[in-house]
Structure formats: structure tokens, C-alpha cells
Image: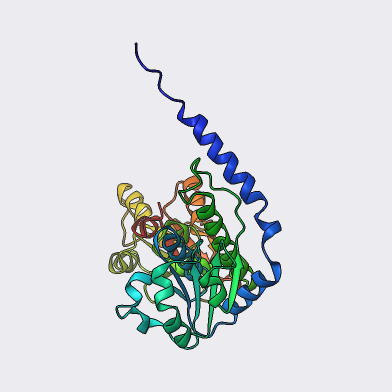
């Protein structure tokens, strides 16, 4: 007789329930005064905010450091196991050291604690035992009270790890809000990531002077062809004698003229210029510019500043090259 397979998701539901129940009470048990003091320390830190931990706590410390760095706080992760072999040299007197250790008795950290204390401005610890060695030796300790792990043996770090991850995220977001960190700031810190790229604006990718092709309305067609070929964008902007951009002329427009077998020596160039061209503000998000291009079945947009002056050209080609789509 085949043995019936266990319902793994039943176990998963128990884990969800245990962790959610425990974490839902976390905010009620945290010392608000100490939490605020930790945030103030980080916000006013003149050096780096250094995160330290071992094992799972180390992974959470590294993740918290990464989140802090990406949201405007100078931070790095220091592996406690490597610190005693020279890496302590990265600590400076204006740094704030934050230690993640749920037990508060992590041997590798206790061994180097005195040395760390001599090198940094303040040491903050986040532990599950406020009477632990690390908690007592720290300048400031935040106690995370977790009754039970989600592990049925109450051994494997589960709820406690989630709680430490949650407090790390909470601190990072508290600092982010205190700094008035904006989506533009975030994009500057993530130029190569998908999240950052989604926040890029037209002015970040547009082609600017002196690379913008430009001709006058009364230009000869041969000069227009030369400008389009020379700048290599497949188009040129057209301006009047007051230097105001009045239209756009593309290589597609040129092909349509040539297909009609018109004498290009006699052609009135300005009669073939597109006057009602699509334009966008330089602060428009690139992702919205993409939507506009798709809706109008075009591959280029004229970019203007707040004073309605033309300052660039945004092309689908450059958007694709930036790997935004």
C-alpha cells in the first residue's frame, strides 16, 4: 500500500500563523524610546553605520546594511568572523556599530567586542535577551521579545530571524522618511537596477546639444540630408529665424519625398515638415514616455523644459539600449 504523502502546505499554514501572531505583537513590546535613540544615532552619524552579525543574524545584518545604503545612509557589513583577522581596521571613530545577535552570546562577537568599543563612537545591539553579554556591554540595546520559534522543536531560528529582519527594515524606512529621501534619490543610487531605471526621467536619457540635429525652415534639402546623416539620429528638428523649433523632419519623410520623384533642387522643404510633433516635459518618467510612443506609433519625442524650450530628443533606440524595456 502506497504511503499517503503529507500535506506540506498544512505545515506551511502553521508556520505562517505562528510567525504572524508573534510579529503582530512586536511593535507593542519594543521600547520606543530606545528605538528612537537608535534612529537618531544613525541619522546624525558622521561616519558609517556598520552592521555586524554571524550566521543567519549576519545575513540579516548584511541585508539591513544594503537597504540603508540604497536609501541614503552610508553603511557596510562587517563579518565578525573576519574582523579579528584585520577587518577591524575598517572601523572609524565616527562610526556607529550595530550588532545583530538574537542570543546576545555570539562567541565571535564577544571576542572582539572590547576592540570594537575602542574604535567606534557607539555600539548598538539588537538581541532577544536583554541580560545577555552583548546587550549589557552595548551603549544601547534593543530587546526583541519573541515567545516561540515557528520551528516545532523551538530550536531553528525562524520567528526570531523574521523579527530581526523586520526591525532592520523598520529602522531603514524610519531613516529614509527622516531624510525625506525621494524616488529621484533612489534612482540615483540604482542606475543599473530595474527599480532605479523605472524612475529615470526623460532628461536622464535624452540627446542634448550639441548632438541635436537642427536646420532652418529655409534650408536646402541637401543640407537637411547632410544634417540627418551627420548627426545619425534619423531626424532633425526644424527652427524658424527666431530660433524657435517649429517642426521635425525624419528620414521617413525624406523617403516619402524621394518616392514621389520630386526634383529635390526645387522642393520647398518647409512644406514637408511635421508641425504637430509630439513633445514631453524633461521631468516625465521614461516609462510614461514609452507609453506615449507606443500609443502614437512613433520612435522619438521632442523634450522641453519648464519654460517650453526644446532641450533634447528622447528616442526609443536609447531607451532600449539602456535596457529599460
Q: How is the image coloured?
A: rainbow
Image side of residue 39 versus residue 209, left or right: right
The quarter of the rendered structure image containing the N terminus is: top left
Residue 120 in percent (x, y) is at 48, 85
Figure check: 255 above or below 123: above
Q: Nearer the viewer, residue 256 or 93?
A: 93
Residue 270 visible in image: no
Nearer to the camera, 96 or 143:
143
Q: Residue at x 63, y 77 (%)?
A: 40
Residue 87 sits in which quadrant?
bottom left
Q: Position of residue 267 (x, y in %)?
A: 37, 59
Tell which of 66 and 218 is nearer to you: 66
Q: Residue furthest top?
A: 1
- Front one among 75 and 38: 38
Q: Is residue 222 visible?
A: yes
Coordinates of residue 188 in the picture (x, y in percent): 47, 70
Residue 268, placed above or below residue 82: above
Q: Name the residue rendered at 34%, 64% in the picture.
A: 221
Amino acid at each position: 500500500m502506497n504511503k499517503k504523502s503529507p500535506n506540506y502546505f498544512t505545515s506551511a499554514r502553521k508556520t505562517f500563523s505562528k510567525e504572524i501572531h508573534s510579529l503582530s505583537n512586536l511593535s507593542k513590546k519594543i521600547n520606543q524610546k530606545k528605538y528612537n535613540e537608535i534612529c537618531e544615532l544613525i541619522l546624525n552619524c558622521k561616519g558609517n553605520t556598520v552592521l555586524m552579525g554571524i550566521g543567519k543574524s549576519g545575513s540579516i545584518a548584511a541585508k539591513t546594511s544594503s537597504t540603508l545604503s540604497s536609501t541614503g545612509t552610508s553603511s557596510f557589513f562587517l563579518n565578525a568572523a573576519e574582523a579579528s583577522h584585520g577587518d577591524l581596521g575598517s572601523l572609524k571613530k565616527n562610526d556607529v556599530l550595530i550588532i545583530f545577535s538574537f542570543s546576545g552570546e555570539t562567541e565571535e562577537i564577544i571576542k572582539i567586542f572590547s576592540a570594537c568599543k575602542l574604535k567606534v563612537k557607539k555600539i548598538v545591539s539588537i538581541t532577544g535577551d536583554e541580560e545577555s553579554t552583548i546587550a549589557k556591554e552595548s551603549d544601547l540595546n534593543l530587546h526583541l521579545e519573541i515567545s516561540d520559534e515557528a520551528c516545532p522543536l523551538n530550536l531553528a531560528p525562524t520567528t526570531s530571524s523574521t523579527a530581526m529582519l523586520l526591525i532592520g527594515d523598520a529602522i531603514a524606512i524610519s531613516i529614509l522618511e527622516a531624510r525625506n529621501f525621494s524616488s529621484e534619490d533612489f534612482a540615483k543610487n540604482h542606475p543599473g537596477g530595474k527599480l532605479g531605471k523605472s524612475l529615470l526621467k526623460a532628461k536622464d536619457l535624452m540627446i542634448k546639444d550639441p548632438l541635436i540635429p537642427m536646420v532652418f525652415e529655409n534650408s536646402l534639402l541637401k543640407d537637411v540630408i547632410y544634417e540627418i546623416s551627420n548627426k545619425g539620429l534619423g531626424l532633425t528638428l526644424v527652427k524658424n529665424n527666431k530660433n524657435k523649433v517649429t517642426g521635425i523632419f525624419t528620414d521617413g519623410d525624406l523617403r516619402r519625398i524621394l518616392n514621389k520623384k520630386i526634383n529635390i533642387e526645387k522642393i520647398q522643404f518647409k512644406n514637408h515638415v511635421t508641425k504637430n510633433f509630439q513633445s514631453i516635459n524633461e521631468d516625465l518618467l521614461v516609462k510614461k514616455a514609452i507609453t506615449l510612443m507606443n500609443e502614437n506609433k512613433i520612435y522619438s519625442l521632442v523634450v522641453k523644459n519648464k519654460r517650453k524650450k526644446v532641450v533634447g530628443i528622447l528616442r526609443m533606440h536609447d531607451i532600449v539600449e539602456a535596457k529599460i524595456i
